[in-house]
Image (tube, rainbow, N blue to C red):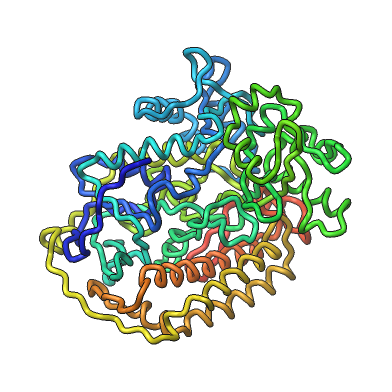
Amino acid sequence: MISVPDNSQSPLHQPTQFDVVVVGAGAAGLYAALCLPDRLNVALITKDTLSIGASDWAQGGIAAAIAPGDSPVLHVEDTLRAGAGLCDADAVEFLAQQAPDRIRSLVEMGVTFDRRGEQLALTLEAAHSRPRVLHAADTTGRAVVSTLTALVLRQANITVLERAFALSVWLNPDTGDCQGVQLMYQGQISWRRAGAVVLATGGGGQVFAQTTNPDVSTGDGVAIAWRAGAILRDLEFVQFHPTALTKPGAPHFLISEAVRGEGAHLVDDQGHRFAFEYHPDGELAPRDVVSRAIFSHLQKTKPDPATSHVYLDLRPIPDDQIRHRFPNIIQVCQQWGVDVFRDMIPVAPAAHYWMGGIATDLITCTSIPNLYAVGETASTGVHGANRLASNSLLECIVFGAQLGELTPDQSVLNQESGSQSPVSISPLTLSDEATKTDKMLAMQDQLKRLVWQSAGICRSAQKLERAIAQVEVWQAELAALPLSQQLRNLTPQKTVQLDVPNADYLVRTWGETSNLLDIAYLILKSALFRTESRGGHHRLDYPQPDPDWQMHTLVQEERWWKG
């Protein structure tokens, strides 16, 4: 159990200014915070507790070309091939070239990857031409995150604020530069000035009814960056993992791609390995291909494909190998009545990873000065239209390391003298109607079902247009709530105390509802805008790739364009 320092002192005694604020405490946020120069005063903000994020759930591993028969050049080729023509070659080359050094960094930090003798163990995953995926059994993300968390908690220059929810980035009204964040923390909404803000809040899988992502993955960073006017990119590209546990009452637990890499078969009710009918690589084809293969096969063979599944058969893998590589999968499946040594695992696709995000360059800068993004929140260009397996943890580490060169904007920091300035607090009185969460939670539930049905594995203009119209209705309904009108009109630098029970939960629910509505709108509009099929984006009415669309979708406020 990780011991977390007590940050529970009153916000009155919390610093109102930091050199850098990092929002998000998954692998990207943790590693970025550790890479920042230790002379800087850093706030690490997490809306839940440490180690409750998608990185902690990552099973498969982290890719790096470190084997004698491998090379960064081959890693680049595989990544570009998976990305379906939309990867930025410079970004991919940077990722692959930096990977071996970043692995060495993690090992030196204490991450205990599996080994074969003295050598780091490597496995093969779909669309990789060589075994290059490092792992720690089937809980690689947890191994990385727990190690980074322990190191963060020992850093004197990093202040961890748990259960703190970032509502918006704070912009200078004259220059448009980022100068901090608006934060809900311990019953108060306040403004924390910073010379740089790093968004590392992860993806937005919770906008889909079927997802492998944890509850915290509500697209917060992308939503608040969009509202601030940042340029976003490729939001239509969502990767649906083909093999999530699908059993009544069970969560959509991800059954790692590494299982198929080790030799598991994907079969239907008759035991037929149907994936080869859709791609010569069968179950080891790219994820979007395998997901559509399952979707198409269920459409052909099941009366109600939306509630059906296929099977993952681990029995071709030796028992000892399963025990060594997949202890967590064994345990979770057993919990839901599936013995992987005797039974086949019922699986179906679920939303897993968002290739799109806030557009950044190779040093994580966004289009807003002093605002940075890293991890799944960012669109660095390395994933293109379809992420190569196990490149996501690698992206967190490689681009998080870039923040080691970050220099906070001193002009922002000099606007306020000292980091312990007195705070003037005003009460914010909310009506009973404003404090009800049932309407917002019901809206979230309806939204998730709508987005899954209209922007899931297969899309069409008719469904997308209807869904956009409905989301706009819900956005207007949320904006009309008294709570929205009060929270959206708070004066910068003014700290307010909410006078209701469970104020933090109320504001987080409101904030997540707002963010989910906004990212649903962005995904739907982007999916409608791209009139072709490519990678993780498949249009039934435009089923083929279009050479004229071999370019990015860019979004800023209400403008969509190719670039």
Residue 563 seen anywhere in this rendered image of the structure: no
Rendered location of residue 128, percent (x, y): 63, 30
From the viewer's perspective, tell me whether residue 86 is left or right of residue 310. Answer: left
- Identify which residue is drawn at 16% across, 62% down: 13
Residue 249 drawn above or below residue 121: below
Of the 4 image quadrants, the one containing the N terminus is top left
Q: For this view, does 501 lie left or right of residue 78?
A: left
**Which quadrant of the figure contains the C terminus?**
bottom right
**Where residue 173 sits: x, y (%)?**
28, 72
Foreground: 218 or 215? 215
In the displayed structure, would residue 537 be above or below residue 101?
below
Name which quarter of the figure residue 421 lies in.
bottom left
| Residue 277 drawn at (x, y percent) | 85, 39
Residue 538: x, y in percent? 71, 54
Nearer to the camera, 160 or 180: 160
Q: Is residue 488 visible?
A: yes
Residue shown at 31% from the left, 84% from the top: 429
Residue at x-position 66% and y-position 52%: 350
In-front residue for pair 519/55: 55
Residue at 50% over, 23% down:
114
Q: How many marks?
A: 0
Q: Nearer the viewer, residue 186 or 455?
A: 186
Task: Establish if 169 lies above or below 76.
Answer: below
Q: Is residue 417 left or right of residue 111?
A: left
